[in-house]
Amino acid sequence: MNALLEGLQSLLSLEVAGCIGLGLVLGLLVGAFPGITATMAVALAAGFTLALDPVPGLAVLLTIYVAANFGDRIPSILVNTPGTPASIATTLDGYPMAKQGRAGLALTISAFGSALGIIASLVLFAAAAIPIATIARDYFKSPELFALVLFGLTVMIGISSKSVLKGLIAGVFGLLLGTVGTYSATADQRFTFGNLNLLEGLDFIAIIIGLFGIAELFDQLLTYHKNKVKPISSLGRWWPNKSEYKEMGKPLAVGGGVGLFVGLIPAAGGDIAGLIGWDRARAASKTPEKFGKGSIEGITASDTASSATLGGSLTTTMALGIPGDSVMAVMIGSMMIWGLQPGPNLFTTRPDLVVSITGIMLIATILSLVIALVRSKFMVKLLDLPNHYLWTIILVFCMVGTYATSNSIFVVITMLVFGVIGVVMKRVGIPAGPVVLGLLLGPLAEANLSRSLVLLQGKPFFEVVSPIAMVLVALSILSLLFPLLTKLFGRRKKGESLEDPIAARVTAESASSTDAAEQSAAVAADANAAAPSSERKSEND
């Protein structure tokens, strides 16, 4: 009861209210602009929140995370361009509905599905976070913690890239970055090259802003081409009728179940959940032929599934210290700077944080839903904003945010260097997620492995290494071998399970974690080319 009261009391301040409002605006805008991901926005905001207390800082970051799941549906439905990777599946039925004059209805259904998915995931988080953390605290010692970190890293490597080799390269690169600085156990300097700026290691904020912010900016500058698809401005009616509400029932349940399960898998993310939820809802539907052609069931299932991953991702991140997705990886870095170490001990020592985090995300969800249901064309007009204005704003925020964290030009240079590295990685298909995870979890894994080896010098192996640790190591190996085995035996049919050719392309691109803007351009081109010339003419008019 004390934890509940303390958690609620920490939210009753003007500072927290202001931070939620700021995060709400930023999140909705981030989602509405294609190519700017929630990870990028949270990375940028992290540099400005370090001066805040943990709860107000979390209020900004978590609200951006929530609100982006509402804002990104706007370009997906009106321009056939996913605002973030999580809304890729929204285009499959959202844009066809918009072309049929039902854009307002699609936006409303999407908002309801997203809100219900997030709320269901928060129930999971509130119910499961402390029990999972308690079990992990009681049974996870140094060998188990090392195995858990290894499992989280290998799962992200296996999922985040179509090529396991490229994922491994990213993970090893991140681990190497984590070794730079002074080794705490022996006080030896490693890879500092006599530079005093590297004694405490590479600046985390500079690296994530470089990899997710500057890299995205540089990549858009190099690949920019004007989008000829104009936003659909005729929104039509907004509210579903009685029969349409009934039609939403089954896909809500299917999408919610898929999203809650996928959210618990590290690195899976909303893009994968949305596509799986869409496919499972189509398999359970009485009218599967309508999917991909403007189905209410399709857009409900996809948006509910992609949004329902938030709570599961938050659960694994906070209770086990294993990031559920790239946004949570950035969140862990910010919390460590605040002196909070996500993992088994966090919620057993600070159970009030469960209440605070749940309250922040619930408030953000309700406010985002209210704004999403407002019949305003303001967000639609934002899609016409010239990109060069946006790029300038992003560059300024990247540089100011990085400098504000350390007052060091060296850190700003580090950010720019990793921006160039990030562009090269994007071009060759190496994911950034495992790099960040390796940088964050590498020192933790190293410390626990070192303690485990010391214990093994004086005790039998099976007395130190428990079955839990061995199972986690086995799962780690399996997570790396699984993509290779499925490819070898021809069982990897994720893209083939979707009959619609546009959906198949999106699924294949999503699985390879490519840039959202590149994905959406291909989808938009296919959809525009497939539409009758009369439809395109009326749409442009």
Image: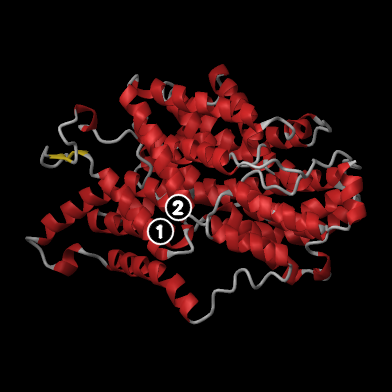
Q: How many marks?
A: 2
Query: Toward the viewer: 237 or 414?
Result: 414
Q: Position of residue 55 (x, y in %)?
A: 47, 28
Query: Toward the viewer: 152 or 501?
Result: 501
Q: Position of residue 206 (x, y in %)?
A: 38, 33
Please identify the residue farthest to the left as the structure is shown. Answer: 458
Return the mark for residue 167. 1
Query: Residue sitting at 78 percent across and 29 percent down?
Result: 378
Q: Are marks 1 and 2 in contact (CB under 8 Å)?
A: yes
Residue 77 vertical position relative to residue 480 in the rendered view, above or below: above
Can the viewer see residue 206 in this picture? no
Q: Is residue 246 left or right of residue 466?
A: right
Q: Is residue 53 left or right of residue 176?
A: right
Query: Residue sitting at 82 percent across and 54 percent down?
Result: 96
Q: Is residue 192 left or right of residue 494?
A: left
Graded by Cα atoms within 10 Å as few (under 14), some (14 to 19) or many (20 or more), the crowding at tag 2 reads many
Q: Position of residue 323 (x, y in %)?
A: 43, 49
Q: Position of residue 8 (x, y in %)?
A: 54, 29
User: What is the distance, in whole Å, between disc 1 and disc 2 at their CAs?
Assistant: 6 Å
Return the mark for residue 431. 2
Q: Amino acid at mark 1?
A: Gly
* First-in-chain label (1 vs 2): 1
